[in-house]
Amino acid sequence: MRIIQLLPTISFGDAIGNDTITLKNAMTDMGYETDIYAENIDKRLPSDTAQKIDRLESVSEDDVIIYHLSTGTDLTFSLGNYKCRKIMVYHNITPPEFFHPYSFAAEKLTEYGYKGVEYLRDGVDYVLADSAYNKAELVRMGYTCPIDVRPILIKFSDYEQTPDEAVMKKYSDGKANLIFVGRIAPNKKQEDVIRTFYCYRKINPNSRLILVGSYSGMENYYERLVKYAELLGISNDVVFTGHIKFPEILAYYRTAHAFVCMSQHEGFCVPLAEAMFFNVPIIAYDAAAISDTLGGCGVLLDDNSPVYAAAVIDRVLSDDKLRQHILDGQKKRLEDFSYERIRETFEKQLKGFLDKK
Amino acid sequence: MENNINIEEIMAEIKREIKEKGLTDDMLSFDDVPYEKPVSVGGSEQLHEALEFLNANCCVQPYKELKGSPVSVFVKKVIRKLVKFYVEPVVQEQNDLNMNTVTVLNALSEKDMSEKVSALEASQKELMLRLDRLERENAALRSQLERQDRE
């Protein structure tokens, strides 16, 4: 029996790529014969990480396919060609309506993604969802197969690298740095983070907002955000990093005083776990999978009013006891995302599924 | 130490303070910020094509190539000569009008111009918000003064 992981694209350093690779290593450690097959393989990955999907031959009935679903792709619809048992890892798909005002291509791609989710409703035997939110979405869509929650595997060892010195120096200047990390995308509601900062800056003028993330493919949304910051008169203190190198991301986390998330749609939100790792207090609007990932830690806002969010940020940054209480909670929650803990969960889930045969 | 902190209580306290101080979310709305809409959604592709057509065809010719038998071509030529005094000035006027219209349409469709208009609209909305805020402050100050006068 082989366990084959399938996905359309395996990228270097992204959450799903890292999850797939870490699962492969975990399954190898468990003694399974396993491999990754993808249509597109990032050239920066070591050559033995994955193979091109056209090299996948003779899948036997004994084999098991683990399919990572996160976008619209023809691969989803070809899954039925493999006559073996299938597990879907559901990372969630951004609802198309978020992209409607900005990108026709992204809207169509995500629509296609949801068609794929519907198509696989009776086409997979078991689902591992990144969050309870993702599981609930599948149940709503009529999935009747067993679904378990398994948080995404995060390679925290990568975060031990040396952060970029220039960024560290530039932003360790005494100003309060509010950050949000995530690609510039309408579902992440960066405009609400800017609105929150607009209000916070009135309380603490010695502050800045850093929006870390690539805007590739969302140029018009990005330009609108830049214009918004200009019209609000705060553009000097709002930094858009664009696509940056990993050591620079680490430096932004290390110089951050608060992580502000106003996102309205997340299937898991890896940056929340990263903020926990870097000991940055989290203030996040309660939407989609955010509360699942926070698991009771950080500060969860029941309202996305910028005045309220700004007042909460101010309280967190000025009240040492409260901040320490939040950081203690985040540290505790981070243990749930440790490699050992999730690997153990995954091993139980995988064995449970394989034994049912 | 952990047990002494109740985050929910703190959040409620913050909400109470915001209400007491009358703090509001008055600021320019993100919806009022102009942006370039995607081509396939906004229909600007058709608009662009139409504008190109107007630029290429804004000048109309008063005379077309005459077709038909030699006799009918001869008759048409005679008629053309007879109406020339009337047709040519009208066509010239129409061409002047067309060219000026196309110049204005080109200028209006330029990205800079549309952005400027949108930015002006946005700043106007922001000014309206400021005006509203100032009016409210003014009213509050007036009532304060009236109270003081009465005392």
Image (tube, grey):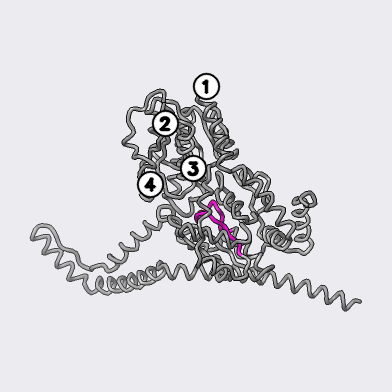
**Magenta residues, start to end:** A177-191
Say what secondary structure mark 2 lies in.
strand
Q: Which numbered disc covers residue A33?
A: 2
Determine if marks 2 and 1 fall on one subunit: yes
A290 lies left or right of A103: right
Residue A68 visible at all: no
Pointer 2 with pointer 3, Cβ within 8 A: no
Q: Mark 2 or 1, which is nearer the eye?
A: 2
* Residue B63 falls in image quadrant: bottom left
What's the amino acid at mark 1?
Lys
Residue A352 position (above or below residue B22)? above
Indicate which disc, 3 or 1, sits on the residue closer to the N terminus: 3
Label 3: how many residues lie within 10 Å, few (<14), some (14-19) or many (20+)?
some
What secondary structure is found at the residue carrying circle 1?
loop
Q: Position of residue B17 (x, y in %)?
A: 78, 60
Mark 1 Cα-neighbour bin, 10 Å: few <14, some 14–19, many ≥20 = few
Mark 1, residue position: A356
Residue depicted at x 72% and y 53%: A325
Quadrant of the image containing the N terminus of chain A = top left
Considering the numbered disc 4 on the image, is that residue within a helix, a strand or a loop? loop
- Marks 2 and 3 sit apart, C-alpha to C-alpha, by 18 Å
User: Which residue position holds label 3?
Assistant: A19
Instruction: Please identify the quarter of the rendering in which residue A55 is found.
Output: top left
